[in-house]
Image (cartoon, rainbow, N blue to C red):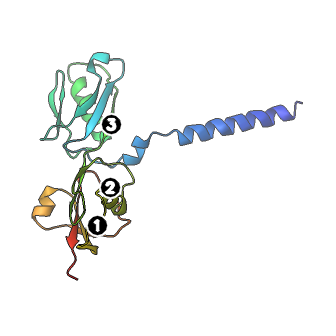
């Protein structure tokens, strides 16, 4: 019995370690994701329920309203950068050692335009590919080119005609504009 017990404890420790590894929040996978207008986030300040909020939509200017601090610039910052910014500003006269956590609740929409049956805005979900985006937009029209598909990173790149060619398995990002061009044949 004594020989089985350490083996059982090792098995339990292994199961717990695996559970902790697989329980890593999905937010860590988006550590390089830059926040933008339309993203919905939550901000939690540890031990300060009056300074903790959920479902905050970034404004058109990419800011978030925050008590005492006013409008905090979030546009183009990662979650970690926004956490450090808010911590630094709270440390400057409000809290001694604030601990801030920012999470993305809902990513901004991506857009599908051109030769698809239902062009429009669609909610982003991690792992969205061109194939999935076109499927959500009702599929190709009869005139669609299946090889002339372009992704624009934002409205400015579309106006400047600075898109990148895409294939069916190319990943879509929040805020992207996917354009399916017309086939000439």
Lateral position of residue 170 relative to residue 1, left or right: left
Packing grade of label 1 (10 A; few <14, some 14-19, many >=20) is some
Q: Residue at x 36, y 63 (%)?
A: 131
In primary-sequence order, the first of circles 1 and 3 is 3
Lateral position of residue 70 relative to residue 35, left or right: left
Packing grade of label 3 (10 A; few <14, some 14-19, many >=20) is some
Packing grade of label 2 (10 A; few <14, some 14-19, many >=20) is some
Residue 87 got which mark? none
Q: Residue at x 27, y 47 (%)?
A: 34
Residue 95 image position (x, y, % from top left) = 27, 19
Q: Which callout, 1 or 3, points to the residue nearer the camera?
A: 1
Closest to the observer, 95 or 36: 36
Instruction: Report how many numbered discs are placed on residues in the image.
Output: 3
Residue 134 image position (x, y, % from top left) = 31, 61
Q: Quadrant of residue 179?
A: bottom left
Please name the residue that numbered disc 3 is placed on. Answer: 105
State the CA–CA distance, disc 1 to disc 3: 31 Å
Closest to the observer, 147 or 176: 147
State the CA–CA distance, disc 2 to disc 3: 21 Å
Please name the residue that numbered disc 1 is placed on. Answer: 140
Please name the residue that numbered disc 2 is placed on. Answer: 136
Residue 40 image position (x, y, % from top left) = 26, 37
């Amino acid at each position: 019995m004594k020989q089985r017990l350490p083996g059982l404890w090792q098995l339990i420790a292994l199961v717990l370690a695996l559970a902790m590894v697989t329980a890593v929040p999905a937010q860590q996978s988006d550590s390089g994701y830059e926040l933008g207008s339309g993203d919905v986030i939550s901000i939690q300040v540890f031990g300060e329920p009056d300074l903790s909020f959920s479902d905050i939509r970034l404004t058109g200017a990419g800011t978030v309203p925050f008590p005492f601090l006013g409008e905090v610039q979030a546009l183009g910052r990662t979650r970690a950068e926004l956490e450090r910014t808010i911590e630094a500003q709270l440390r400057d006269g409000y809290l001694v050692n604030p601990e801030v956590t920012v999470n993305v609740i809902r990513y901004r929409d991506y857009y599908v335009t051109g030769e698809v049956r239902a062009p429009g805005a669609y909610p982003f979900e991690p792992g969205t590919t061109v194939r999935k985006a076109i499927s959500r937009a009702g599929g190709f029209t009869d005139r669609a080119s299946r090889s002339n598909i372009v992704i624009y990173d934002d409205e400015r790149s579309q106006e400047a005609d600075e898109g990148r060619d895409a294939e069916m398995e190319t990943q879509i990002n929040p805020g992207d504009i996917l354009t399916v061009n017309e086939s000439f044949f």
